[in-house]
Amino acid sequence: MKNLIASILLIGAFSISCSDQCQKNDCSYHGYCLDGTCTCDEGYTGESCHISIRPESVKLDEVSILSFPSTNNGESLDPIGTGGKSDVYFKLYQGERMVYQGEKIEQDLDLGQQKCQEKTSLVLSDYDTEYTLKLYDKDEGAIVDEYMCSLSFRLEDLIKWKKEKLQMENAQIAISMQLSFVY
C-alpha cells in the first residue's frame, strides 16, 4: 500500500512538473513551449529562443516613398510652367555602386505627398556596406534628373526588430519597406 501511495505521489509530482515547465518558460516570446522544450521561431535559437540569428540576406520586396521635400534649397523642384509637380523615382546604391534604379516613375505628385510605391526583388546581403536610397525628379528634356534627397541605412538597421514592414525617415524623406529575411 505504501508503495502504491508513493507511486501515485511520484506520478502526480512528475505530471505537475511537466505542465509547470512551460508555464515558467515563455521562450522569450520568440517561439512556443511543448513539454518544457522551446521550438523557436525562424531567426531565433537557444534553449529559450533568446539568441537572435542574423539573416544571410534581406529581400527588399517593396519600397514606398512616404514623404519628400517640396523644394530644393527654397527652389521649386519643377519649373512653374509644369505646375510644380514632381515625377519621382528612386535609385538604390550599395556604397558608391548603383544596384537598382526604380522602374516606376510616379508622375505629377503633389509635393511633399506620398504616392510613390514600387515592388522590387532586391536581395541585400552586404553587412559591411552602407546602402543609400536616393530620390530623383525626372525632368523631360533635361540631361540629368534632379536629385531630391536620400536616406542611408545598413542591413543591421533593417534586421534590428525583424519586422516585415519597416519605416525609416530623416529630416528630408520617409520611406516604408516591405522585407523578408533569408536564413
Image (cartoon, rainbow, N blue to C red):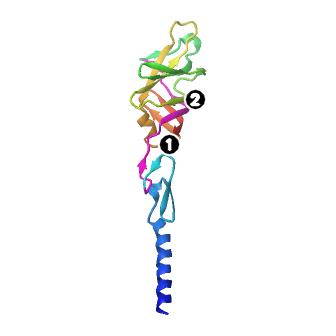
Residue range in magenta is 47-72
145 to 48, vertically: above or below: above
Q: Is residue 68 magenta?
A: yes
29 to 179, vertically: above or below: below
Q: What is the number of the mark on residue 81?
A: none
The answer to whether residue 163 is visible is yes
Considering depth in this image, is 9 or 167 the residue closer to the camera?
9
Question: In the rendered structure, which disc, 2 or 1, sits on the residue that comes first in sequence?
Answer: 2
Counting from the top left corner in percent of width and height, residue 168 is at 46, 34
Q: Which residue is at a point 50% across and 93% down the rendered structure image?
A: 1
Badge 1 element:
loop
Q: Amino acid at mark 2?
A: Ser
Q: Amino acid at mark 1?
A: Lys
Q: CA distance from mark 2 to mark 1?
A: 17 Å
> What residue is pinned by disc 1?
163
> What residue is pinned by disc 2?
121
Badge 2 element:
strand
